[in-house]
Image (spheres, coloured by chain):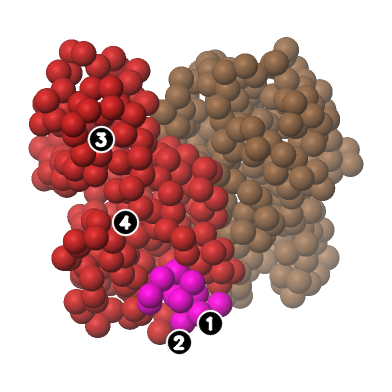
Chain colours: A brown, B red
Amino acid sequence: MALDGVQALVFDVFGTVVDWRSGIARDATPFLAKHAPAASATDFADGWRRRYSPAMEEVRSGRRPFTRLDVLHRENLEALLPDFGIDPGKVTPDELEALNLAWHRLDPWPDSVAGLTRLKAGYIIAPLSNGNIRLMLDMAKRAGLPWDAILGAEVSQAYKPTPQAYLRTAEVLGVRPEQICLVAAHNGDLAAARRCGLRTAFVARPVEHGPGQKIDLVAEQDWDVVAADFVDLASRLGL
Amino acid sequence: MALDGVQALVFDVFGTVVDWRSGIARDATPFLAKHAPAASATDFADGWRRRYSPAMEEVRSGRRPFTRLDVLHRENLEALLPDFGIDPGKVTPDELEALNLAWHRLDPWPDSVAGLTRLKAGYIIAPLSNGNIRLMLDMAKRAGLPWDAILGAEVSQAYKPTPQAYLRTAEVLGVRPEQICLVAAHNGDLAAARRCGLRTAFVARPVEHGPGQKIDLVAEQDWDVVAADFVDLASRLGL
């Protein structure tokens, strides 16, 4: 079997388990109808997401102490408003907070819950996401994601692709890096995990970025497993 | 309702959710049959548990950096052997490691899973135990404890009853202390939680320490809720 000796499957979440773009666009729609009627909700989702990695880079570089993603998302939202012609002074803190929680309400891809449920019978399953614990917890409770534990950046106090994000996750699980496998739709995340010694499984999510997606359509390295979706991954692992 | 405004129930685990004494005695029985046939397995369990708080006190006092409970349990086990006339040199590391994992295999009290399942419909439920993440995770997976997340000492990097163990748990959940409620069978744990501003629920576990138990038989303060077991707690909370 491809993953002999592996005890835990840890998952990238935004894009791999859940469809962030559609979910953010859906929750932004009533907000934009009020504040920027001409704006595209998917453009708004893309713009918000584009500020994600630069915000974490402040933490990864050491310029800023570890700050949970809910806080970065909120700051990014406020910074995004002028790009859509919205005067931040005309939006109430309650409106911003409600919209910020859209990240807690993302829907899973159609195969995610069924696949995770099968995978859970053979492995420890947990998110290894940059999302904070409460965000992952609310998402799981709403969507029925059957995690065994919530791991990831807030537990590791490090944002992917910093090595500590992967290595401290193995440490918390009491195993060597090669005894855990990262499941992700992003070749870059898998490459960083492999450099730390983790096993790797790629699942393409070809419309994560919408119909014109150009990146991460195929496996770019010989990952340990390549599967069509989570249900196919379970079958390939004999579950 | 007694817990108006509470979003999460966090649980003491050893003694409150699971029966550590019977479980440790059960798993120690074959070990003792080999190494100390005259020894009482419940005495062995009690002796092992007696070393629990002093070991954590090294961390709580700051004399030792945070060290996960699996490591403390293992050290305590090795220290315990001579008390039962066992020569540590005659026990293999594999035997010790297997016995140390008995803490991962404790059985829940008869009402725990049914009660937690009902409570989960109305609240976030998570352990706030001194047990480490992997220990809590293995226990939950084996026993079917339906936690929404694994919180506690390893996430907080502090052992109860240090205030940080309670306060950082609230922080991770993104709520004020009074928005979480500790459920515990131990008056001392509840008292420490109340001093931090948490709400409190007492559930007596009158045979945690065996048939002659003298402590924690009744609520010693006016805790926010006092329930007979977890199923009764769910009913009292309208679930």
User: Are labels 3 and 4 on one chain?
Assistant: yes
Residue type at tag 4: Gly
B172 lies above or below A236: below
Q: For the residues tagged 3 and 2, is the chain the same?
A: yes
Range drawn in magenta: B227-239
The reply to whether discs 1 and 2 touch (Cβ–Cβ < 8 Å) is yes
Name the chain under label 3: B
> Is residue A119 toward the left or the right of residue B18 in the image?
right
Q: Name the residue under label 4.
A: B15
Where does label 2 land, which residue?
Answer: B1
Residue A14, image x, y percentages: 66, 43
Q: Can residue A110 be seen in this view?
A: yes
- The mark found on residue B73 in the picture is 3
Nearest to N terminus: mark 1 or mark 3: 3
Q: Earlier in the sequence, mark 4 or mark 2?
A: 2
Q: Which residue lies furthest to the bottom in this view?
A: B1
Report in which chain the residue with disc 1 lies. Answer: B
